[in-house]
Image: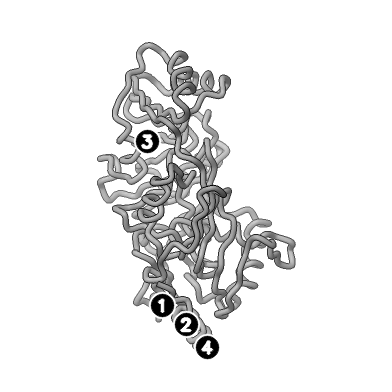
Amino acid sequence: MDISKQLQKQILDAALDNQALQIIGNNTKAFYGRSEKNQGESGVLPLNVAEHSGILDYQPAELTITARAGTPLSEIISLLTEHQQMLPFEPPVFENKATLGGCVASAMTGPRRPWTGAVRDYLIGTRILTGEGKEIRLGGKVMKNVAGYDLFRPMAGALGTLGLMLDITLKLLPLPEREVCYYMLTDTNNMTQILRDLRSRSMPVSGASYHQGQFLLRLSGSMSSIDDATNYLPAEMKETDIVYWQDLNEHRLSFFDDSSPLYRLVVPANAPYDTISGECIVDWGGALRWIKTPLQFGELQQHAGDLGGSASIYRNGTHGEEVFSPLPDQLLDLHKRIKKVMDPAGILNPGRLYRDL
């Protein structure tokens, strides 16, 4: 269903009244980002795109798909699977309720991310409504602002602060012919060495995780490439159920069950593991670390910075606090300039990404 005209009218009315809007789909990511201004508070009104749904164009031979922002990811994935194709960045579907718009706005990716790329790497273009209600198509003939910056890529991860996405076009990849999962009891040093060996031989790794002494490895590729890779695995590695990767991606593991703050660290894959107290699940071959710790967020940010990375509060943070690591001054200035062009009055998801954005 196309409700773009209704959405445009809501934005135009809000712009006239300088009224803040909170963009929502099926609300699967309400926990993510800052929560200073919530729906129902301080005059913030919902701008619901869930009904703006439907697949507009799918070209299997070209490996591209275009769909409206409210389209459930599960619907898209089901269609792609029929044609042996996939969304390369493996986004979580959150009980089949997550939408395409929320996927791109949050830039959430799964265990495959280090080996296939991020959401923005596969974003070809998007049609958006600005904070002034203007309809703009970004991508294709690349539209740039005064800084000469491609405007459609920053939409990935901007949490709706730069515009309301209506339609989104993505590049796809073929599904791997085969996927297998292995596990072994070992330490992180051995895991790092095994991954280094596999990487040097260009083996088809698509997932590498570690938790409570257990190293789990996923291989994805052709039958022959999987057979070749298994020849280089330690004898102690045993095949196990591939479902672990779905449970990790959807946060269905028991580690994610409680209501304590969950922190997300992105660091170099070879960064040491013993510098932060608390419980941790390692993903992305060491580059992503889910952490529950008694440390304060500021302390955790310092630790992450010392390791050459960044930290964020994924969920269950304190109301009103910053949840992402500060942007470098130049990048923050660029983001503010883009925001000024796309949403001059700052009515779209104000404060969701950073206090001043």
Quadrant that contains the N terminus? bottom left
Outermost front residue: 61
The mark nearer the N terminus, 3 or 4, is 4
Q: CA distance from mark 1 to mark 4?
A: 14 Å
Number of marks drawn: 4
Q: Amino acid at mark 2?
A: Gln
- In the picture, the disc for residue 16 is 4
The mark nearer the N terminus, 2 or 3, is 2
Labels 1 and 2 touching (C-beta < 8 A): yes
Q: How is the image coloured?
A: one colour
Q: Element type at marker 2?
A: loop
Q: Amino acid at mark 3?
A: Ile
From the viewer's perspective, tell me whether residue 27 is left or right of residue 138: left
Q: Amino acid at mark 4?
A: Leu
Q: CA distance from mark 1 to mark 3?
A: 36 Å
Labels 1 and 4 touching (C-beta < 8 A): no
Query: Residue at label 2?
Result: 19
Q: Element type at marker 1?
A: loop
**Looking at the image, is mark 3 or mark 4 nearer the viewer?**
4
Query: Residue at label 1?
Result: 44
Q: CA distance from mark 2 to mark 3?
A: 41 Å
Q: Element type at marker 4?
A: helix
Coordinates of residue 334 in the picture (x, y in percent):
66, 61
Q: CA distance from mark 1 to mark 2?
A: 7 Å
The mark nearer the N terminus, 1 or 2, is 2
Q: Is residue 319 visible?
A: yes
- In the picture, the disc for residue 281 is 3
The relative height of residue 185 versus residue 46 in the rendered view (above or below) is above
Outermost top residue: 235
Give the class, few, some or many, for how many residues have Cα within 10 Å of label 4's Cα (few <14, many ≥20).
Answer: few
Coordinates of residue 201 in the picture (x, y in percent):
56, 19
Labels 3 and 4 touching (C-beta < 8 A): no
